[in-house]
Image: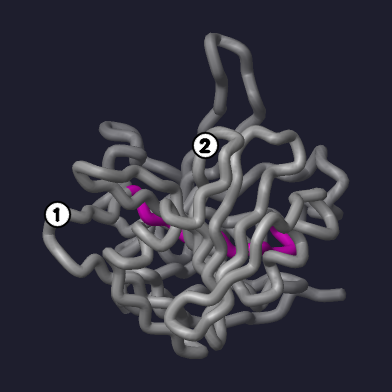
Amino acid sequence: MQATAHSTKALAPDGRWVSFACRARSVQDDWYWHFRLTSRSMGVGVSVTDRGYPSVLIEQLGNRLVQQLTYDNQPLQLLANADGDGWQGIWTGPHHCLIMAFPGGRVDAGAVTGVLDQLVLTDTAAGLVVKPRSSEVSSWSLYGVKFTSGGSVTIYPAADAARLVPEGSAGKSVENGEVWVKTMGIAGVERGRKFLHSGPKAVCLVDDELTSDTGVGAADQEELLQSLDVRWGA
């Protein structure tokens, strides 16, 4: 199958439109978003996914449904992680899910509703917008993920990820920005590499998946990096 032009857009949880365009054999329809919510009384990791993702957690990852409730007339599920370390509270709206990740082994419905009480959730087909009810709650470290035949793409607003862009060295010029190769490592041990794509309104990290079993080929990767055009706040 030949690479073709793809173009799509969605509302990020911060209420801004994000457009995604590239040439690829395939681009997954779903968007995935991740961020942190913090206040003086809470700190929780949050993901926004499609409505079908809770079944993936249960059927493929082995997470266990502990309790099923409703919140604001919408389904609310409490799931325990398969390894017993951590659990999730999952609010399911008409179009998307809000997944809150908690540490420890004690599942607590009150902790989930305590977070939801501090949020205004607006769920449409375009995206789930998450707004704190007060200035005491902060949302930060927001990023999105799209999966393509050229590799998975992690997307950051340009202003938030400016520190990731190398200073004093030009990247490879591509159609909509510049690309650098970044070697990833922990404690001096190399953990593979990523490509950093910097455009006018977004910074993206593209996983180098040539040696994985995902079916990504060199031509797929090159076409994606050459054509990628992501705009946060488009």
Classify the position of the C terminus by image quarter. Answer: bottom left
Judging by the rendered image, the residue that carries numbered circle 1 is: 136
Q: Is residue 9 found inside the magenta-colored segment of the image?
A: no
Stretch in magenta? 141-150
The three-letter amino acid code for the residue at tag 2 is Pro
**Most common SS among magenta residues:** strand
Secondary structure found at label 2: loop
Give the residue type at disc 1.
Glu
Residue 153 lies, in percent from the top left, at 57, 56
Residue 180 bears which disc, if any?
none
Position of 17 compared to 167: left or right?
right
The quarter of the picture where residue 128 lies is bottom left
Give the answer, above or below, for where 175 lies relative to 103.
Answer: below
Q: Secondary structure at mark 1?
A: loop
Q: Position of residue 43 (x, y in %)?
A: 34, 43
Colour setup of the view = one colour
Whichever of callouts 2 and 1 sits on the residue coming sooner in the sequence is 2
Is residue 183 in view from this perspective?
Answer: yes
Is 65 left, or right, of 177 in this rendering?
Answer: right
Q: Is residue 173 visible?
A: no
Tell me what residue is drawn at x 22 percent, y 53 percent. 138
Q: Is residue 147 magenta?
A: yes
Q: Residues within 10 Å of mark 2 (few under 14, many from 20)?
A: some
Residue 91 rendering spot, x and y as whole percentages: 52, 70
Residue 137 spot, x, y in % from top left = 21, 55
Pick out the residue farthest to the top.
188
Residue positioned 56% across, 84% down in the render: 95
Q: Which residue in the structure is indicated by mark 2?
A: 103
The residue that appears at 64% across and 73% down in the rendered structure is 23
Query: What is the spatial separation of the Cα atoms under label 2 and label 1, in whole angstroms?
Result: 22 Å
